[in-house]
Amino acid sequence: MSNEEQISQPQEALTPAQRVRSDWRSLVEKVSYKAIVNNIPYLAFVVLLCVLYISNSHRALEMQRELNAQNKMLKELRWKYMDTKSQLMYVKTETQVIKNAEHIGLKPSLLPAYKIGRK
């Protein structure tokens, strides 16, 4: 069969091998130099989208790493705050204040506290 006979035949009458050959030929025609030159704006747009997609995913990963580092630092600072707060509560107890005051020579008063008021 010549090419003209194949073109004139409907697609249903083609054998599977002929259909594959014609699909291959159409693919080669689509990828030919002329087709590439005609589609340069579209290809440039696709390349631009690919570059934007890659840069966006890279930026998202960097932001996620930074967020994880900030969360880790926040947890450490929270634990440090709670530890300092518990130490301060311990130091403010009456017995600890009395012990610390003895080092500088102060003694607790034996008289109860009283209020000074006006008459």
Image: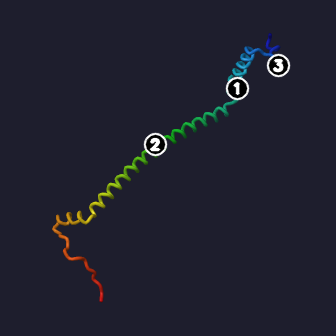
Which residue carries the number 1 mark? 35
Residue 43 in which image quadrant: top right
Residue 57 rendering spot, x and y as whole percentages: 53, 39
Pointer 2 local density, CA inside 10 Å: few below 14, some 14–19, many at least 20: few
Q: Which element is circle 1 on?
A: helix
Name the residue: 70% across, 26% down.
35
Tell me which label, 2 or 3, sits earlier in the chain: 3
Q: Which element is circle 3 on?
A: loop
- Residue 81 in the figure: left or right of residue 12: left
Residue 88 rendering spot, x and y as whole percentages: 30, 60
Tell me which label, 2 or 1, sits earlier in the chain: 1
Name the residue: 70% across, 19% down.
24
Which residue carries the number 2 mark? 65
Which residue carries the number 3 mark? 10
- 39 and 104: which is toward the camera: 104
Name the residue: 67% across, 27% down.
36
- 51 and 38: which is toward the camera: 51
Residue 44, above or below 90: above
Q: Which element is circle 2 on?
A: helix
Give the amino acid type for the residue marked by disc 3 in the picture. Pro
Residue 18 in which image quadrant: top right
Pointer 1 local density, CA inside 10 Å: few below 14, some 14–19, many at least 20: few
Give the amino acid type for the residue marked by disc 1 in the picture. Ala
Which circle, 1 or 3, is nearer the viewer? 3
Residue 103 in which image quadrant: bottom left
